[in-house]
Image (spheres, grey):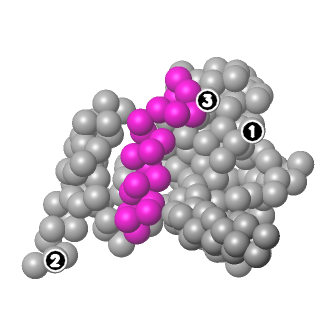
Amino acid sequence: MRYLIIIFFSVLFLGACSNKKSKSDIDILFTPDTLSVGYTYWLDETGPFRADCDKQLSLVLMGSISSIKEPTTDPGPLYMAQEGIIKIEKVFKIKALDDKTYAGQKFLKTDCLYDSGLNLEDKVLVFCYDYDNGYTVNGHQAILKLNSFNEPIVEATRRFINHNEHPISLKKDHKIWASYGFKENLQERINCASKMKK
């Protein structure tokens, strides 16, 4: 009997050790609230990569479009807005932003969906930076449409985060990112990192 107890606890201990979580493996207890994120529409760079190497992502998640409104010019004459709500399924990165830090909200609201080609119930992967101490999307190219939550781009994103967003880690997934139109952005980020090493 004593041997069975020892074996049981040994297996339990080894199992716990082998289930070490990666940086992008975040457990979230969701609340029924909504997180509103900004839209830095004036930036030339859109998408998950910024040319400045030291600028890291602030919030990365995946989910599905649960509502989408008609386009409008209500925010002003500078851009066409289209508001949508994304139901969050999984969060891969959270940067603390004082009182505006993501706190388990189940929904994300953004008005950058105009001309994105996204529709109700589409699955998406969302990349946010921070601006003025709040999360922001820098364009609809930062919201990637997915056919499923198991697409290679999801694992490529997790690898990028797990390697502290070091551009050299992206080389392995170059074709995956290029298939989403980020070939040039990716190369710019890699070139920037190479210059910083010199």
Where the C terminus falls, by quadrant? bottom left
Q: What stretch is highlighted in magenta?
A: 146-165
Instruction: Tell me where residue 103 appears, x and y as whole percent.
Output: 77, 64
> Which of the numbered marks, if any, corresponds to residue 123?
3
Disc 1 marks a residue whose amino acid type is Lys
Q: Mark 2 points at which residue?
A: 197
Q: Is residue 73 above or below residue 127?
A: above
Q: In this view, does 174 lie above or below 97?
A: above
Q: Name the residue under label 1.
A: 87
Q: Is residue 192 above or below residue 197?
A: above
Disc 2 crowd rating (10 Å Cα; few below 14, some 14-19, many 20+) is: few
Disc 3 crowd rating (10 Å Cα; few below 14, some 14-19, many 20+) is: many
Disc 2 marks a residue whose amino acid type is Lys
Circle 3: element type: strand
Circle 1: element type: strand
Q: Which of marks 2 and 3 is nearer the N terminus?
A: 3
Q: Earlier in the sequence, mark 2 or mark 1?
A: 1
Q: Which of marks 3 and 1 is nearer the N terminus?
A: 1
